[in-house]
Each structure stands twice: as C-alpha cells, then as structure tokens.
Image (cartoon, rainbow, N blue to C red):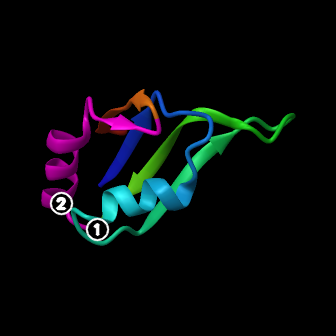
Amino acid sequence: MRLLVRNMARSTTEETLRDLFESFGPIQSCVIVNDAETGKSKGFGFVDTPKAGHAKAAIRQLNGCELDGEIIRVKRAN
C-alpha cells in the first residue's frame, strides 16, 4: 500500500522517514519529493509497504504526530 506523507519539515530525510515507518513493518520504498530546480524538499513524500495492515497501523499512529518539529499528515495515496 502506498502512503502519502505531507507537511514534513524541509529538513526531514528519507532515512528519518524510513526509520519512522519501519517500526510498523517492512518498507518497500521511501521517497521524499524534491523541487527540480532547487533540489530542496517540497515537504511531502511517499512510503510503500507490502502489507496493508502495517500501512493502516502507521496511518492510525502517525497521522498528526510530530516529526522534525512539524505535525505530519499520513493517508493512503490515491
């Protein structure tokens, strides 16, 4: 299941995001979207998990939690 993570601090790294989500189970991929011109984070990214149950648990626990000083929003990506 692919998850959309929004409202991240621009300083959040893919490693930090991966570590956060791996506490709920294995991660297939983790990508923070960067601006093509500046190379800086756009403040959102995607996390792919192989099991829907792990993804749903992550949504319940992490949506609205603080990460690097920002309150992140986590939902299923469309």
Could one spot residue 78 in this view of the protein? no
Where 1 sits versus 72, above or below? below
Question: How far separated are the C-alphas under marks 2 and 1?
Answer: 8 Å
The foreground one among 23 and 6 is 23
Q: How many marks?
A: 2
> Toward which corner of the image does residue 55 lie, by quadrant?
bottom left
Q: Nearer the viewer, residue 48 or 9?
A: 9
Query: Which residue was labeled with disc 1?
Result: 50
Which residue is tagged 2?
A: 54
Q: Position of residue 5 (x, y in %)?
A: 41, 38
Could you tell me which secondary element the residue under label 2 belongs to? helix
Image marks 2 and 1: residues in contact by CB distance under 8 Å: yes
Give the residue furthest to the front.
69
Q: Which residues are magenta?
A: 50-68
Does dot 1 land on a helix, a strand or a loop? loop
Residue 68, placed above or below residue 32: above
Q: Identify the residue at image location x=25%, y=64%.
A: 23
